[in-house]
Image: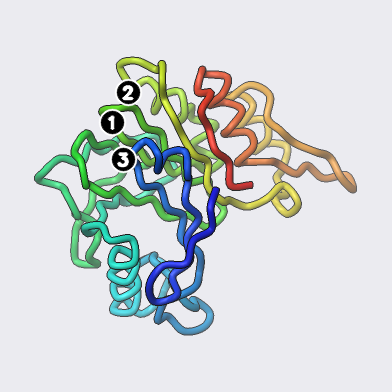
C-alpha cells in the first residue's frame, strides 16, 4: 500500500492494486482534521462523543481531499447485515441527522458512489469485481458470524476479485479470552493466534486475510 499526503494534510493509505483497477480505496489516518483532544484530529465517527459539527467538518475534509462525493455509511452493529447503495442512498449516512439502517456490509454497482466503514480495533475490508464494490466492517463477532463468506457470496463470480485488508488492532496488543477465540474459530476455522504469558493474542486482520485467500481471493493487499 502507498501512504499518500493529500490536501489539508490528510494522510491516507491507498491500496495501489485496486486503484489500478479503477477502485479508489483509502484508509484515513488521524491527521488533517479539526477535532480536539482526545479525538484529535481527523475523527470521522459521530458516535464517539466528539463535537458533531467537527466530525462533519472532518468528513467534508476527507471527501474533498480524495476528490469524491459524500460517502454512504450505515449503523454498524458488529453483525453480518448487507446494505445496497443505489442512487437513492448515495451519500446517505454522511450527515449526523441521517437515519441510517444497520449493516456491516455495504455494496454498490454504481460508479463514483463512495462507501465508508468506520473502525477502531475492527478490520476494514474492500472487495471489488469489475461490476461491484463492497466495504466490510469486520470485528471478531462478525468473523465468528461468517461475515466474509457471506460477503463473497454476494458476488456472482468470485474469479478475478481483488481486495484490501486495512489497518486494525495488531496481534501485539489484541488479548482475547478463550471464549472469543473459540467463537472466531467456529466461524472461520483456525484463527491466527499466539499464546504469550498465559494469554491468547488474536491476529484479527491476518485471520480475515487468510479466510479471503482460502475462499479464492488471490489479489489481496494487506496494510499490516
Looking at the image, which residue is at 33% across and 61% down? 66
Q: Label 3's element?
A: strand
Q: In which quarter of the image is residue 134?
A: top left
Q: Label 1's element?
A: loop
Using the numbered discs, state the Cα–Cα distance from disc 3 to disc 1 in whole angstroms: 10 Å
Q: Quadrant of residue 178?
A: top right
Q: Nearer the viewer, mark 2 or mark 1?
A: 1
Q: Which of 142 and 223 is in front in this view?
A: 223
Q: Would you name the residue on which mark 1 appears?
A: 132
Q: Would you name the residue on which mark 3 appears?
A: 106
Image colouring = rainbow
Q: Would you name the residue on which mark 2 appears?
A: 154
Q: Nearer the viewer, residue 155 or 7?
A: 7
Q: Which of 85 and 202 is in front in this view?
A: 85
Expressed as whole percent of the image width and height from the top left, the position of residue 47 reads: 38, 65
Counting residues from the start of the chain, the first of labels 3 and 1 encountered is: 3
Counting residues from the start of the chain, the first of labels 2 and 1 encountered is: 1
Q: Label 2's element?
A: loop
Q: In this view, does 222 lie above or below 51?
A: above
Expressed as whole percent of the image width and height from the top left, the position of residue 113 reads: 22, 46
Amino acid at each position: 500500500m502507498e501512504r499518500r499526503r493529500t490536501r489539508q494534510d490528510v494522510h491516507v493509505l491507498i491500496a495501489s492494486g485496486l486503484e489500478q483497477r479503477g477502485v479508489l480505496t483509502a484508509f484515513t489516518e488521524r491527521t488533517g482534521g479539526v477535532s480536539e483532544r482526545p479525538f484529535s484530529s481527523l475523527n470521522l465517527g459521530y458516535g464517539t462523543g466528539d463535537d458533531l459539527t467537527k466530525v462533519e467538518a472532518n468528513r467534508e475534509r476527507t471527501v474533498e481531499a480524495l476528490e469524491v462525493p459524500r460517502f454512504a455509511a450505515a449503523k454498524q452493529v458488529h453483525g453480518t447485515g448487507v446494505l445496497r447503495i443505489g442512487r437513492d442512498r448515495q451519500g446517505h449516512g454522511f450527515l449526523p441527522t441521517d437515519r441510517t439502517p444497520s449493516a456491516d456490509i455495504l455494496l454498490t454497482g454504481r460508479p463514483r458512489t463512495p462507501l465508508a466503514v468506520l473502525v477502531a480495533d475492527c478490520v476494514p475490508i474492500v472487495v471489488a469485481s469489475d461490476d461491484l464494490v463492497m466495504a466490510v466492517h469486520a470485528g471478531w463477532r462478525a468473523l465468528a458470524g461468517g461475515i466474509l463468506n457471506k460477503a463473497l457470496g454476494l458476488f456472482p463470480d468470485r474469479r478475478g476479485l481483488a481486495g484490501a485488508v486495512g489497518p486494525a488492532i495488531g496481534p501485539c496488543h489484541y488479548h482475547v479470552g478463550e471464549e472469543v477465540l473459540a467463537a472466531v474459530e467456529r466461524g472461520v476455522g483456525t484463527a491466527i493466534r499466539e499464546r504469550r504469558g498465559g494469554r491468547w493474542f488474536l491476529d484479527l486482520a491476518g485471520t480475515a486475510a487468510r479466510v479471503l485467500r482460502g475462499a479464492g481471493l488471490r489479489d489481496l493487499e494487506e496494510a499490516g
